[in-house]
Amino acid sequence: MKLVIKIAAGMIFGVVALVVAIGAMAGHAVDHATKKQTWVVKVQAPTGYHWSGAFGNRTVDGAGSKEVAVQDVLITAADAQKQDGGSWPLRLTLTKGAKVLDSQVTTAQYGLVTVSGSNL
């Protein structure tokens, strides 16, 4: 009987330790998921050509090339649309540190380009 009680107590202790460990890992994941990250969107356009876009949670109007910093959580997206006609290239490149996460280009009349990335 004492052996059965010791085995049961050991199993209960093991389950409690497992639950505590899982809770600690989940807490770390939630902290990481809600921490804002800095992303950089590089807009490349010829000098004097206009574009307008949404970068994370804000809008930006610009002409020519520009870098836009975005504060967001694990996932972010940006888009820009050409405001001047013509077949000139509008490119967006999303980076996190030195890593390029996405890069897209459009040459369409009043074309739209979108990039997105995640830290997952």
Image (cartoon, helix red, strand yellow):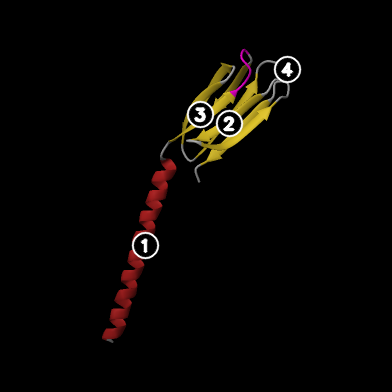
Residue 86 location in percent, x, y?
73, 17
Marks 1 and 3, how far apart in space? 37 Å
Q: Which residue is mark 1?
A: 19
At numbered mark 2, what does the secondary structure look like: helix, strand or loop? strand
Is tag 1's residue or tag 4's residue first in the polypeptide sequence? 1
Q: Which residue is mark 3?
A: 57
Q: As drawn, which residue projects farthest toward the bottom?
A: 1
Does residue 56 appear in the picture of this structure?
no
* Residue type beneath disc 4: Gly
Question: Dot 4 surroundings within 10 Å: few (below 14), some, or many (20 or more)?
Answer: few
Closer to the camera: disc 4 or disc 3? 4
* Residue type beneath disc 1: Val
Q: Which residue is mark 4?
A: 86
Q: Which residue is mark 2?
A: 93
The residue that appears at 41% across and 39% down in the rendered structure is 35
Location of the N terminus by quadrant is bottom left
Closer to the camera: disc 1 or disc 4? 4
> Circles 3 and 2: CB distance less than 8 Å?
no
Q: Is residue 107 left or right of residue 6?
A: right
Q: Which mark is residue 8?
A: none
Vertical placement of residue 90 versus 15, above or below: above
> Circles 4 and 3: CB distance less than 8 Å?
no
Question: Dot 3 surroundings within 10 Å: few (below 14), some, or many (20 or more)?
Answer: few
Marks 1 and 4, how far apart in space? 61 Å
Total count of labels: 4
The residue that appears at 41% across and 47% down in the rendered structure is 30
At numbered mark 3, what does the secondary structure look like: helix, strand or loop? loop
Residue 46 is inside the magenta segment: yes
Is tag 1's residue or tag 3's residue first in the polypeptide sequence? 1
Q: Which residues are magenta?
A: 44-48
